[in-house]
Image (cartoon, rainbow, N blue to C red):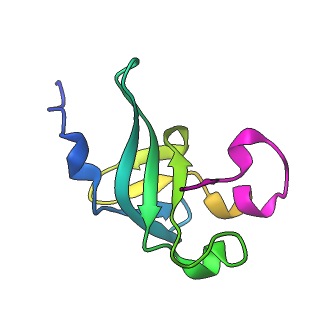
């Protein structure tokens, strides 16, 4: 059976949780690669301030790489961002990008 494609804008407003059930934030916008016709990131606002304390200002959002997304439904599940943020590594996918 083929799934009916959804509008990209239907992602806006959905809550994002880690695969361990921790609230991360709410999708405010999406980052697109127009040449590849693909979503490359999710811009999150209304962040879990405990999760991002000391990393992101309260009025700032983050962009989570779309490759972290594990499932999209009523909510969006991503790989466990807490483990990625707490590793302190310099790997490109180890930290969410600050949104300008």
Q: Residue 29 location, x and y as percent?
A: 35, 53
**97 over 36 or under it: above or below:** below
Instruction: Judge from the rendering whether residue 35 lies leftward or rightward of residue 79; answer left or right.
Output: left
Front residue of 84 and 43:
43
- In the rendered image, the residue lying farthest to the top is 35
Residue 32 included in the magenta stretch of the image: no
Q: Residue 83 location, x and y as percent?
A: 72, 60
- In the rendered image, the residue lying farthest to the right is 89
**94 over 54 or under it: above or below:** above
Residue at image x 52%, y 52%? 63
Report the magenta residues as a range: 84-100
Front residue of 75 and 56:
56
Residue at image x 79%, y 42%? 91
Q: Quadrant of the C terminus?
A: bottom right
Query: How many marks on residues?
Result: 0
Q: Quadrant of the N terminus?
A: top left
- Tell me the quarter of the picture where residue 43 sits: bottom left
Residue 86 included in the magenta stretch of the image: yes
**55 over 32 or under it: above or below:** below
Residue at image x 30%, y 61%? 14
Q: Residue 76 location, x and y as percent?
A: 38, 55
Residue at image x 56%, y 64%? 20
């Amino acid at each position: 059976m083929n799934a009916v494609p959804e509008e990209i804008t239907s992602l806006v407003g959905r809550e994002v949780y880690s695969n361990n059930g921790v609230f991360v934030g709410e999708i405010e916008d999406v980052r697109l690669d127009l040449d590849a016709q693909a979503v490359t990131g999710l811009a999150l606002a209304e962040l879990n301030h405990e999760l991002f304390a000391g990393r992101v200002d309260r009025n700032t959002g983050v962009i989570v790489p779309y490759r972290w997304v594990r499932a999209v439904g009523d909510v969006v599940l991503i790989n466990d961002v807490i483990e990625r943020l707490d590793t302190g590594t310099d790997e490109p996918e180890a930290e969410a990008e600050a949104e300008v």
